[in-house]
Amino acid sequence: MSSRHTRWSNWLLLVPALALLAGILLVPLIRTLWYSVFDPDWTLENYGALFTDGVTTTVLWRTVVTAAMVTVATLLIGYPYAYLMTRVSPRARGVLLAIVLIPFWTSVMARNFAWIVILQDGGPVQSLFAFFGADDVVFYGTTVGVTIAMTQVMLPFMVLPLFSTLGGIDRRLLLAARGLGSSPTAAFWKVFWPLSRGGVMAGVILVFTLSLGFYVTPALLGSPQESLVAQLLAQRTTLLLDFAAAGALGMVVLVVTLVLVAWANRLGGAVSAIGVVAAGPVKESR
Amino acid sequence: MTPIAPETAQNPTLEAAPGSPPAPKAARRRYRHVDPIPWWLKAFGGLVVVFFILPTLFVIPMSFSDAQTFEFPPRGFTWRLYENFFTNPVWLDSLRNSFLVAVLTAVLATTVGTAAAVALWRLPGRAARLVRTLLMVPIVAPAIVVAVAVYIAFLGWRLTGTVTGYVLAHTAIAVPYVLVSVTGALGGLDPRLLRAAASLGSSPGRAFVRVTMPLISRGILTGAIFAFIVSFDEVVLALFLRSPVFQTMPVQMYNSVTVEIDPTISAASSIMVVAVTVIFLLPPLLRGRGRRR
């Protein structure tokens, strides 16, 4: 196995994958970067324009706020759910895990179409609110609607790192705290929560980061007046054909994403969390 | 790249601490009594489960609606939307295109990804780890940024709106999924088997086909299925690569919501949901049959 010949043949096996990655991903990205900084001479004008054109900063800020709302919502929903997963029987745990992965089993367009039906004006959710007396709540075409739909699909990325961390906490510590006279709430906040912070951080960074790049959900459920950065990027590319401006914006989004994911990955295996989401249902049933 | 789930399954929880003998039933019950799961947590869990499956619950009833809009609850019961779907050439062509692209993507991505996974499994060191991380980038990079870059490049290379363009772009984002699942399967492979094959006079290629492949076939199959789904369901790249003469089904679904307000999308959605679920359930089913054999 260790002869020089096999070593070389192994690297040869990597050539197709690397060629594909280079040709389809790296070369286009570098070209885009190139367009954004040579216009036609070396310039950072396109990057400066992001901050001075008045539109981009507004949209970026709205994107950050939306991503933050999704992150908070997934944490509030995902933490108790992940905790419940660590407490139930192995069989029930398998079921709960399979259910977490349902958003990935559901086709993207079918899922977004379903959210349109659910959140539309006069739809079931609005009727429910009207029943309780709140008859002027609007979800379709608002950031709230976008947040609800994004929360559902982002939950796995919060639940999986959390489940991994919470499952590793020795619950006898909680019982010990209770035995020493602590109230359940105090025992949770003083013992359990600090031990779970690693998973919380990983989940928070991961969900926030992935939420920054959403395109289809805000395009279908949001409104053009409240577009997010992905829509702006698409508009500058396909409608305005302003590749330089689009390139600059795209590079900013890409770099921010990769830096944040690398950070989350160091905290708690974010990339492997995505891997689980990818291979999860099959792994679990193995 | 070890997946989380199998790891945590072994993590110590109170109910079943590994290494220690399982607690007797009565003791466990007493333990539950000391440390029960609160009822409100179970109720909350139930609500979250509903939230997870909510969209799926709406799709299928909608597809039998007689209404001209997306109104809910659906009106009447009719197969009209399915009839529309299977008689309208626009929908049928988009389905055929999607299927063609997804099959080609699955074949290409599985080949390329399996080769890379096997190579990385054998190669030690930092360089190999770096390559592995690099190959995972398409999964984490925002789809919209990739789509914009690929669109600009493909315009220049005249690949937009072509099968080749779709397949290449989809393969690039599908390879990481194959890499993950084949790497998982290789984790259970004993390298000594290959040394044994070599010492018995087998060439590396023959050893791969006769020893490695059968042992990791499940991982390869899983990878192929994921590659198929990733391509079949992909919207963002597809929206940028579409042309008036070639578009995939998710793109047609997108049009039917944004431009046409065509309720046929409910039928298309149901078909997508059922198709994707069936394809996802394939490996466990095949495995179950294999075990019985």
Image (cartoon, rainbow, N blue to C red):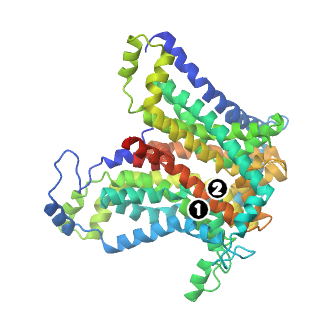
Can residue A101 be seen in this snapshot? yes
For mark 1, give the secondary structure.
helix
> Residue B192 is drawn in which quadrant?
top left
What residue did someone put label 1 on? A150
For the residues beneath circles 2 and 1, the answer to whether they share a chain is: yes
Count of numbered circles in the view: 2
Residue B62 lies, with reference to residue B286, above or below; the image says: below
In this rendering, position of residue B73 left or right of residue B87? left
> In the drawing, what numbered circle is on residue B79?
none
Residue B274 lies, with reference to residue A186, above or below; the image says: above
Q: Which residue is drawn at 53% across and 45% down?
A: A261
Tag 2–tag 1 contact (CB < 8 Å): yes
Q: What residue type is labelled 2?
A: Phe
For mark 2, give the secondary structure.
loop
Find residue A34 and report its horizontal and vertical position in percent.
76, 35
What residue did someone put label 2 on? A214
